[in-house]
Image (cartoon, helix red, strand yellow):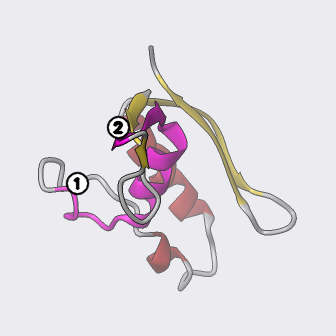
Amino acid sequence: MKDFLFTDDLEIKNGDFAIGESDNQHVKDILLASKGEFKLFPELGVGIDQMLATEDAMEWLIEAKKNLEYDGMNVKNIAFTEEGKLNVDAKYKE
């Protein structure tokens, strides 16, 4: 999906808003947001900070997959690597 790109703020290139592939940006936003943070879709959001307080991450991974699919993504895989990093293989449906 193409969208405005941002890090801490909107990215500007050549005096205009930068536009580019934004799938990973949307995944990050959904995982970080808690339910209710998206005004138009209050049920969207995973709240990754709440997952840190749990011992079993499987329930959190299921919730993350459901939320990404709700947003229109095709989730092939979502899992933690052996190093403890979150790996998300998901793209928006065409």
Tell me the distance, in whole angstroms, between the alpha carbons under discs 2 and 1: 11 Å
Q: Residues within 10 Å of mark 1 (few under 14, many from 20)?
A: some
Compared to 88, does 72 lie above or below?
above
Q: Position of residue 23 (x, y in %)?
A: 50, 37
Disc 2 marks which amino acid? Answer: Asp
Residue annotated with mark 1: 43
- Relative to residue 1, is residue 52 drawn left or right? right
Q: Nearer the viewer, residue 4 or 32?
A: 4
Q: Residue at x 48, y 70 (%)?
A: 48
The question of residue 35 being in magenta is answered with: yes
Q: Position of residue 72 (x, y in %)?
A: 38, 30
Residue annotated with mark 2: 71
The question of residue 93 being in magenta is answered with: no
Q: Residue at x 52, y 75 (%)?
A: 51
Task: Find numbered disc 1 in the image and state the secondary structure of the residue it sits on.
Answer: loop
- Relative to residue 81, is residue 9 drawn left or right? left
Res. 1 mark: none
Q: Position of residue 80 (x, y in %)?
A: 73, 59
* Residue that extends furthest to the left in the rendered view of this protein: 40
Q: Residue at x 12, y 48 (%)?
A: 40
